[in-house]
Amino acid sequence: MVKAVVMPRLGQSEETVKIVHWRKQLGDTVAKGDILFEIETDKAILEVESFYAGTLLKIVAGEGVTVPVQTTVAFVGDPGEPVPEVVLPPVLPKEVEASRPSAAPPPQRDLAGGRRPPSSASPRPVDLPPTAPTVAEPQVFRISPRAAKLAKESAIDPTPIVGTGPGGRIVERDVKQYLEAQGYDRLRITPTAKKLAAREGINLLSLAPKEDGSQTTVADIERVLAERPKPLTRMRQIIAQRLTESYTHAPHFFVTVSADVTELESLRAELKAQGTPYTLTDFILKATALALEQFPTVNSTSDGVSIRWRSKIHLGLAVALEQGLVVPVIRQANELTLAEIHARAQELTAKARAGQLTPAEMTGSTFTISNLGMMDVENFTAIINPGESAILAISSSAKQPVVRNDQVVIRSMMKMTLSSDHRLIDGASAARFLNSIRKSLEEISLWQRSI
Amino acid sequence: MAAFDIVVIGAGPGGYPAAIRAAQLGASVALVEKEKLGGTCLNWGCIPTKTLIASSELFARIKSAGAMGLRVDNPSFDYAAMADRKDQVVQKLRNGVKQLLKANGVTVFEGSASFQTRNRIQVDPAGSGTETVTLAAAKTIISTGAASAMPGFLPRHERVVESRGFLNLRALPATTLILGGGIIGCEFACMLAQLGVRVTMVELLEDIIAGVDADVRRELRRHMEKTLGIRILTGVTLEEIAADDHGVRGRAGQESLEADLLLVALGRKPVTQSLKLENAGLIPNEHGFLDVDAYGRTRVVTIYAVGDVTGGPLLAHAATSQGLVAAENACGRYLRKNETVVPNCIFTTPEIGTVGLSEQEAQQQSRKIKTGKYLMGALGKALAIGEPIGFVKWVSDAETDQLLGAHAVGPHATDLIAEAAVAIRAELTAAELAHTIHAHPTLAEAWMEAAHALMGEPIHSAPPRKPS
């Protein structure tokens, strides 16, 4: 029986969702639990599983289409079953295409002059420059099949060739003349290298001659291929867009303090021995939540015109994954005990690593902590998450000589750097906020009382 | 103290061509040799063994000449005369090297070289009478080669020899035990078996000539066992080895083995001990070899090393190529990298020639490949000369059809591999090779037929079955 695949509501804030990629194609067999397609929210790329088993009979909403949640996007059933006609609800305007780096320089042309399949979204290789500006751009790129074949086999870009055929069409003769004029015969290239270049659309004329005069080999072509730009993963594209927006809109400034975590480390070791393995991050999360209660400005956001305070403290915790970064959110962290923060942080981190965070778990943070303590760094600065006014960058704790009561002693010191949106937060408030966190971390009796 | 632009240590197939090329490029060149010009290859390796093998193969063909319509009654041989011929060939070539060095203005020092500093080399004369000489060297090329490994567990006795010791024999043993089923062991086994010596070979690994393409190994082993009657024991160690004036004995697994002679072919060890490398700031790697970069340079910028002493394929022709590269680089002509396409020839019966990637290596690299094979049994010329044995095989990249490897076993396989080496180095595709006209009737046609087969369009063999 035909089942409708409905766009699920994955979070509270999402009203519309964009389908970025269909993992299953029309006619593919689908098992229950198979990933059907990927969707993009403003936070992440997510996978949508099938609730049904059968064959993918129809895709109503294709790639790049934004649909409201609860819309039917596809049908699964037995092969040959009739599928009901469905009209997509009015779709929101597509996202600005300019944000996609794969936008190819017009006019869209295939090396062979043939039609480019619509699914080929691979970026145009940079080694094929667009038409030289001096050549009058014909309305349509016209090339005879024989000429196109010769150009492709010769692994050259035919666009600069001036056509002498009917209506300015490039004919075989033009390609031959062009090859001769460009000194194509003098290129020294091994047969396999030429074949590889032709297959991969590398313009042999664009390759710089080799310094030692030796012939162009497979290794040279493979190097060009390896250097070709490849599209970023969708996750990295989102990261790129959001971080650029934040860094260019919010004037960042930075304040750094060193926290003495010697006693905290020994308390942590003590607790660990007792079977409660708190991380340093747990303490920092708690200390930050306390500080945010004291400094409401830091828990606010601004567009440069107005300021908006958020009554609830939701802490984002940056988690590095192989393919990028995700920021799960610990909600109302100020109302949680250290043990609860620990449990929540562990759960969210594990889910993040397994790629199982829901959009709801990744949205709504009011302040973010980024901890590179495990990475052996002395100090670093972070870029503010869009929609927030500050972010705390935690570096590794390391034993250092410090002066206490005019004596040099060895203490475990940890640098913390606050990046603040200067439109909202002054230097003095940032310093006070940061020192409040530092004091909490250093005040060991506070922690002993709260455990 | 004599000063030279280039001092080459070791006059083997790596060293003497390096010296000649450096002299051609205008450098003042000294060549130091502690034994004989030509090194292992010319004196105790390639040349003498191939001379003996030529005799043994001809003898084997004469014995089977009846199949070709010839009648030769009671063929026999005189091993001492064979050995004399071998010495004459070696002598002639050695003189040739001497003349070449002289003609190119290379100064030859006879003696053992050692480093005093990184650019000062002491030469201690081999015999008495001459004095120790010190050479100042702007650049040095080390090409001291390798020598047969003779592990300590082997008894020291005249009935226990390695390849070099074997070549001094003037008479053949009736039975021989060969320890080691590598290239040297297999070549000697075939030669001895053809001359009527009963041969038993013991190899620790699971197969002989490890590292060679599996199809080729299978073909060789079949011929060695079936045609030549060689006993091959693999996957066992030879233990309790003893030698006395009556013979040599050993135990392989449960079995006791006896023979008149034990030929040890357990691989080769680099010769570096007498060089005092530490004075030059050089340290051999954990296997005793000198590491070099792609341009033949050691860790000391003025010192190059080529050939067996650097490890790698331990082949004379590789050493020669590396020697020329090092000489050119040392003379600052231009920076050239060592060649990577190195053919490997094995003078067994049947002969083997391989170059490039084997099927097994391609699998290890998870490379997608295609193969095309042609049996010599289907080739007119192979039948005509009465040797319809073995095959040739191409390995190509599945996507570009680039020829990546070639493997030949059969008549003249060691000569046939030259074409494949050119094709692979020139990055030819299977189509280019198949479209090249190969003269008929020749053995080399097999490459063209195999290339056709690789493309799924064989002419002189059955087409691959089409999926119905």
Image (tube, coloured by chain):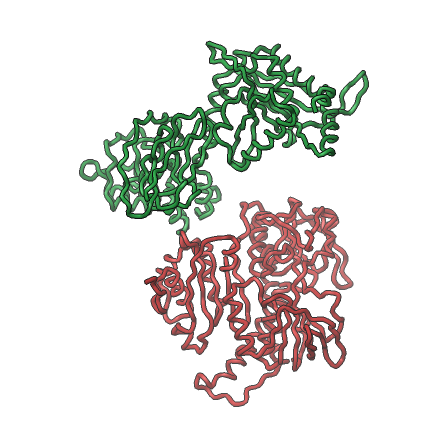
Chain colours: A green, B red
Residue at the (31%, 32%) spot, across then down: A131
Residue B105 can be seen, yes or no:
no
Displayed quadrant of residue B176: bottom right
Residue A292 in which image quadrant:
top right
Q: Name the spot of residue B421 as percent of width and height, x first.
A: 47, 59
Spot the residue most to the bottom: B73
Q: Is B151 in front, or is B300?
A: B151
Nearest the eye: B413 or B113: B413
**Looking at this view, is A26 or B181 the one in front?**
A26
Residue A34: percent from left, percent from top:
43, 43
The image position of residue A396, as x and y in percent, is 66, 28
Task: Return the residue nearer the eye: B123 or A440.
Answer: A440
Disc count in the image? 0
Quarter placement of the C terminus of chain A:
top right
Q: Could you tell me which residue is drawn at 42 percent across and 36 percent down?
A: A38
Say which quadrant the N terminus of chain A sits in: top left
Residue B194 shown left or right of residue A199 in the figure:
right
Q: Which residue is the extreme one toward the front? A: A1
Horizontal and vertical percent position of residue A23: 40, 41
When the figure is inspected, residue B466 is found, relative to residue A15, above or below; the finding is below
Q: Is residue B261 above or below residue A151?
A: below
Q: Is residue B279 visible?
A: yes
